[in-house]
Amino acid sequence: MIQTEAERQFYLEMSGIRMWYARNPLPGAAPSPDYDFGVQEAEVAVVPRLTVPVAPAARQPDPEKASRNRDKIARLQSLMAPAPKNAATVTPVPEKTEPQAPPPEEPEVQPEVSDTAPEADVASVPRLSLQAWVGSRVVLVGQLSEDSSFALQESLAQNILRSLGEQGVKASGVLHWPLFNNLKVSLNGPEHLAVALKALFQNVASQKVVVLGESGDWLAAGLGREPDVVFETSLATLATDPDRKRLLWQLIKPLRA
């Protein structure tokens, strides 16, 4: 049995229970004079009083001062008023002059634009993809097709020249025309094409010339003479058409060595 408060506090401390005090008296609890520390009265805050300034009484208007102010204003207005004009002074009125009409404008002369000239130039530009195979006696100029195998077309051209007795055939580079996609560019003209063809046929002297594919005046201008045989069928079409091969053989058979 716990006899004293000190024993109770000792056992509570050994049990890990902290001592506490109730803030307010518990209902039915015995008074504890040892732990009555009294109740402190709350300090009353003193609010300072605000003093409201009293507006001074409005002064009565002075009638004499008001009349003096009116006299000053009247004198100032008389000084600022403009001086009256002299009746003898006559202001001359400018004479009215009739406005002169502006000279008629000369109509602008616009140069006539021919709509048919560009179309004619565009229509005269051929689309070419040419290659030449040069032999000792015969030169074959063929129109290449980009839709077929270039190796197949070159092999067919070599076989045609071999059938004519040519050995050691040399192939030139491929000439693509026009130079620019815009056909109205002046560098796509026929005179520039002739210069390019002369470079392509620079090794052609007295050989017979066989043309397979499209032909025209541009070819004769670049070659310097008319070709000996013109067969308007490309190498790609000849590779798949035996009948045209026989017709071509009848045309080039006289060139055989």
Image (cartoon, rainbow, N blue to C red):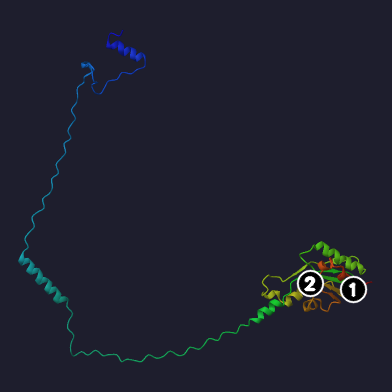
Residue plotted at (27% across, 10% down): 4
Residue 236: which quarter of the image?
bottom right
**Badge number at residue 75:** none
Q: Where is residue 39 in the image (x, y as percent from the top left)?
A: 19, 24
**Residue behind mark 1:** 252
149 w.r.t. 188: above or below: above
**Badge number at residue 199:** 2
Q: Where is residue 234 in the image (x, y as percent from the top left)?
A: 81, 70
35 w.r.t. 169: above or below: above
Q: Would you call the spot at circle 1 few (<14 residues within 10 Å), some (14-19), or many (20 or more)? A: some
Residue plotted at (85% across, 63% down): 155
Residue 10: which quarter of the image?
top left
Residue plotted at (66% across, 79% down): 118
Q: Would you call the spot at circle 2 few (<14 residues within 10 Å), some (14-19), or many (20 or more)? A: few
Which of the two residues, 230 or 194, is positioned nearer the viewer here?
A: 230
Residue 109: which quarter of the image?
bottom right
- Name the element at disc 2: helix
